[in-house]
Image (tube, rainbow, N blue to C red):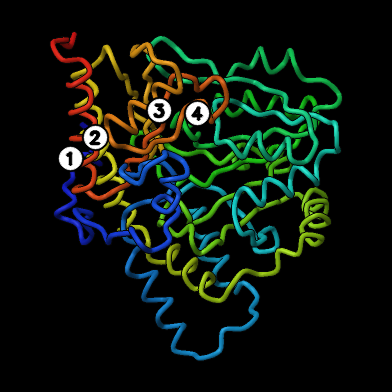
Amino acid sequence: MNKQLMASSQTLRYTFDISAPRENTNAEKYTLREKLFGTDNVLPVWVADMDIDTPDFVLEAVKKRLLHPIIGYEDVPASAYEAQIRWMKKEHGVDFSLEEMLHSHSVVASMSVAIEAFSKAGEKVIVQTPVYPPFFQSVHAHQRKILKNPLKQSACGKYVFDIEDLKSKIDQSTKLLLLCSPHNPVGRVWSRDELEEILEVCLEHNIVVFSDEIHSDLVYEPNKHIPFASLSQKARNITVTAMGVGKTFNMAGFAMSSVAIPNKALRDRFLEVYKRVHFAQGNVLSHVAFEAAYTDGKEWLAALKIHLMQNFRMLEKLCAKFPHAIQVTQPQATYLAWLDCRRMGLSNKELKGFFVTEAKLGLNMGLSFAKEGSGFMRLNFAISSAKMLEVVEHLEFALQKRFEGSKAC
């Protein structure tokens, strides 16, 4: 057992046994239950934010700023970017400078700008499925063509790049690769060798890489996130890196992330679209929250990752009782479990029905991540210990009822 799991969250300052209730707060994962699942009677473990309290040091920074009675236009302060730059250098070994940084509302917004900036209508953008739906939705929305390069899955459940498939499909109209690193939903942390294979292909064909690294801090030992731009100077010259605090510190509602573009020529092309959209500079409270997270967040994050893996172990233990129904591979990163339910022999519609009506749980359908997700479900385990116990009990009851008399291997 690694050191991260041996440590007890009780010995740290932060624990996550319970969390504030989110019902009646306009939280998306609760308000959309009826629309998505046909009922409010489900525990929502779908959208990728946490049912865990946003850190106290972030909230205190916001309260302090509110002591000043004017909330007007404000540039993102250099100190906010500098806090992120220091964090990225220390935690991930990548160097960005202040001039390379841009504010964005979200990674998806940044992705849309990149698609518009580095390709033209009718040209091809590489998407590696199964993947977070906005990857392919954004390509369609901008009238580009998707060059689908599906990940390969081994017998043990591990996903890898299919480099030969990628090489066989690229042509002169292929302009951009959308990289999900770490990967959502399959939870892979790509190795240096794997990333360098992607880099070699992109350099050969003059392809820009948009690297979504929003989950880069949520990596479990012994895995280590390697920023694509950190591979080499050549990698820096073709990479647009999207990152931020939204996932790491449960701050999606602040609507603030960043983009780092070291190559000035690429940055200028990005800015042409960026300025047309008028991103402006976000809001005052987001600025101070962003800076506080990167300044004071290390201890909180260490405790969080221990908690998240404890939650996953609960789910893993349950699935081990029903290997004829659900198989799950431990994610190397993220707080998203990719449940392989194909052995249940259900259609995707029936699978969703099982989770909603029998388990009383609201999950993401794997099919929403492209056809390669057929037969899978995505479960968000970034919830309190108390709520995770409830989720596991719901699922165990449903599985026992459906497979009564069936014995685990």
Tag 4 and tag 3, C-beta contact below 8 Å: no
**Which numbered circle lies on residue 6?**
1
Please state the horizontal and vertical placement of residue 263, each as a whole percent of the image.
76, 49
Quarter of the image where one finds residue 131 = top right
Rendered residue at 67%/40% (across/down) = 210
Q: Badge 1, how many Cα within 10 Å: few under 14, some, many 20+?
A: few
Tag 1 and tag 2, C-beta contact below 8 Å: yes
Q: Amino acid at mark 3?
A: Lys
Q: Amino acid at mark 1?
A: Met
Which secondary structure lies at badge 2?
A: loop
| Earlier residue among tags 1 and 4 | 1
Among all residues in the image, which is located at the extreme bottom?
69
Which mark lies nearer to you, 2 or 3?
3
Q: Nearest the camera: 17 or 158?
A: 17
| Earlier residue among tags 1 and 3 | 1
Q: Badge 3, how many Cα within 10 Å: few under 14, some, many 20+?
A: many
Which secondary structure lies at badge 4?
A: loop
Q: Nearest the camera: 406 or 300?
A: 406
Q: Residue under label 3, please give it.
A: 352
Q: Is residue 218 visible?
A: yes
Q: Badge 2, how many Cα within 10 Å: few under 14, some, many 20+?
A: few
Q: Amino acid at mark 2?
A: Asn
Q: Residue under label 4, please give it.
A: 191
Q: Residue under label 2, please give it.
A: 2
| Earlier residue among tags 4 and 2 | 2
Please state the horizontal and vertical placement of residue 148, each as a whole percent of the image.
67, 22
Rendered residue at 61%/34% (across/down) = 179
Q: Is residue 336 left or right of residue 386?
A: right
Which secondary structure lies at badge 3?
A: helix
**Which numbered circle lies on residue 67?**
none
Please state the horizontal and vertical placement of residue 94, each as a whole percent of the image.
56, 48
